[in-house]
Every structure is written in C-alpha cells, then in structure tokens.
Amino acid sequence: MKKKVAVGLSGGVDSSVAAYLLKEQGYELIGIYMQNWHDTEGILAGDCPSHDDIVFAKLVAKKLDIPFHLVDLSSEYKQRVVDYMFSEYEAGRTPNPDVLCNREIKFDVFWKVALEFGVDYVATGHYCRKDEIETPSGTYYRLLAGKDPNKDQSYFLCQLDQEQLKTALFPIGHLQKSEVRAIAAKMELATAERKDSQGICFIGKVDLPTFLQQKLSVKKGRIVEIAKDTWFYGKRKDLPFEVDRPGEDALQKICRPYHYLPKDGVVVGEHRGAHFFTIGQRKGLNVGGKAEPLFVIATDTELNVVYVGQGHDHPGLNRRALKIEASDAHWVRPDKRLHVGESAAYQVRIRYRQELQNARIHCLEDGLYLHFEQHQRGIASGQFAAWYENEELIGSGVIR
C-alpha cells in the first residue's frame, strides 16, 4: 500500500519540485496551500501577492495530477507569529518570524491539519535533510543541513522536535538550487522561472517601520552616539576562549548585553521610535557628516533612546558571548542535552546564512552561556542561536 504524503505547495519552485520528486518515488500525494495572511498594509507593491501564489500552486497540482486543498490559517498566524512580532519589537527585541512560522504554523498548526487528511508524512520544499540514527539511548531523527550551502535552511527549522521530524520529508535537501530549477524546467512546471519569495514568511517583503506602525506608535526620541573609547556602561574584560570552565560570575558578566545611558554619549539626531530599530542596523538613522558609517549598537525602549557607534569595528557592535534562558533552550537531539555543570564545543550561527562560528556552550542553573572563539557582530536579543555538530543541527534557543 502506498504511503500518503501532504505537500505544502506554496506556489514556488521548491515545493513544486518536492511534490514532483515524491510522486516519482511512488507516494500518494495531496497538495495543500496555506493561506496565512490577507492584509497588504506595509507590503511593498507587487511583492508576494497570495492570489498569484494560489494560482501557481493549483497549476502545479493540476500538472502533477494530485488533489489540491486550501486551508486558511490566518487567525493562528496572526496570533502566534504577527502578534508575537509586535510584542517583541515593542519590548526592544528582534524576533525571527521565519523560525516562528516554522515552529508555530508549518510544523504545528499546518502539520496537525495535514495529518487529519490521513497522511503518513508531511513534506515541504526546505533545503535541509533528515536521517535516522541508532544510539545506546534509542532511535533519533537528525536534522541535517541542506547540500546547497547558499540555500541551507536548517536554521529556520531549529525549533523542531523529534515528533515533528518523524513525519517530516524534505525531498530537495540533497539538491542544489540550480538542479531544482532544471528539474522544474524539464517537467514544464509553471513555477520553473518564478522568483523566490523574500521578506517575512507568508507576508512578503515589507517596509518594516510601516508594517510595525499598524500596532506600534511613532514616538520621537534621541539618537545618542557612543564613542569607541567610552563604548559601554560598566567595563568588563573578555575571557580567553581557551578556558574550558570559566567561573560562573565571569560567564554571566560577559554574556550581558551592553548597556548605555544617555549621559555616556552625545545627541546626534532624532528617531521615530526606538522599537523600530535593531542592533547592527545602519539604514533609517538619517544622520550624516560622520567619518565612518553609524550603526545601532543598542536600543532602550523605556527611555526611547537609540544608541549608535561609528564603524564596523566599534566595540559595542561586537560581543564574545550570549545567554539563553533555561526555559528558552531547545534540543532537537534531546539525548545530547547538556546538564548543569557540563559544557561542550559546537559550531553556532546567530542568523540565517551566517558562517558557522566556533563556540563553547556552558550549562548553568539559569541557562546556557555561549562563549565564542571570535567576536560576533550584531548579537540581538530575541533572535535565535542554533548550534551544530558538523552537518547536524543539535539545538537552539532565544538570545537574551
């Protein structure tokens, strides 16, 4: 008897080829399109129109001769992704909506809806891979990086668990993007030459301040420049990376985000709301006349102050460590979970497409402390850090 698979058809080339490959492998398929967003306020003109996505998804389903269904998950998407985005930005943190979309929608709400169709697996067009491994403590599913280093999307799936991975299929994870395009062209799929979507998952490319102003009010405040030689409030030293078991106090100190006060710098401009800015941001400051470009190095949403520094090498823009609260730590491989007092070396990324960075993770009572071999630029509270062991994604957590 054929195994049945629900394919999330997005109207893009990746999910289209995923569906084609699964049909070639002999699976019984159904195609499902997720309608997750209806509002167009803040979306750049002509970007990611859902009507076109639905049309292309239907064309692919017809070409492959598979049933097509549309499910409206916009209510759940608003509650779980968009409202969370607004609350995080309002608090001065920088959420990652694509990680949230996968955790809360694609592999939770949609995953459960798909299973109601009586399928054995749920497939997506993500560039990542899955396999199964036997260990002394049991059988586990491994989440592996996609073979195309320029398209690897394992980072966006860093919050999946073993139950979700058990029924997940990633048919194109072993392919290069160029190969996916070639297959689509050869099979004359309607999406063969369609551009990849950009911007926020299921919303599209947005003007972020305009989008956020749907819920967050404009509030004028000061832009304060912090000089390089007075770059943070409360000086501290970096720990040498070679120290395997640094003292708890030392770890906690170097993992704290840099903190500034208005008196530490000089006012160089005005902004429309500290919650519209994130660490490392350059655009939107509208402050000129400086020897080097200005970057946001911190925000204070309570005082409504944006702190900036000149140049890529500003010390306030670069940190050696970060913390993940114990409640925010997630282990894709639960058998590799660190216990209090333990530490281990991993390769870590703090944003999509960042090259993996050597780091050591220390587990203390109150959370995980990630100590990097090299300084990391633009560590932002609210983003996700994901840690790997070679090609395998082991765990992740929200940066605090």
Image (spheres, grey):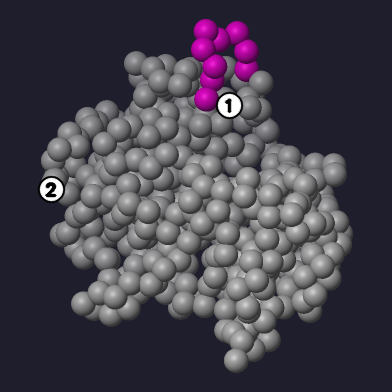
Q: Nearer the viewer, residue 8 or 372?
A: 8
Q: Nearer the viewer, residue 373 or 131?
A: 131
> Is disc 2 surrounded by few (<14), some (14 to 19) or many (20+) residues within 10 Å?
few
Query: Which amino acid, by three-letter code, is at mark 2?
Result: Arg
Asked if residue 55 lies left or right of residue 366, the reply is right
- Residue 153 sits above or below residue 46 on the image: below
Is residue 60 among the parts visible in the rendering?
yes
> Is disc 1 surrounded by few (<14), some (14 to 19) or many (20+) residues within 10 Å?
some
User: Is 46 included in the stretch rendered in magenta?
Assistant: no
- Seen at 82% across and 67% down, the residue is 63
Asked if residue 159 lies left or right of residue 208, the reply is left
Q: Which residues are magenta?
A: 287-295
Question: Number of labelled discs?
Answer: 2
Is residue 224 among the parts visible in the rendering?
no
- Seen at 80% across and 42% down, the residue is 44
Query: Which amino acid, by three-letter code, is at mark 1?
Result: Arg
- Seen at 85% across and 42% down, the residue is 45
Q: Nearer the viewer, residue 282 or 216?
A: 282
- Image-quadrant location for residue 239: top left
Classified by dominant secondary structure, the portion drawn in magenta counts as loop
- The alpha-carbon separation of the residues under discs 1 and 2 comes to 37 Å
> What label does residue 282 carry, if any?
1
Circle 1/circle 2 CB separation < 8 Å: no
- Residue 359 sits above or below residue 229 on the image: below
> What secondary structure is marked by label 1?
loop
Residue 85, x across and y down, in percent: 61, 54
Residue 217, x across and y down, in percent: 71, 45
The residue at which mark 2 appears reads as 245
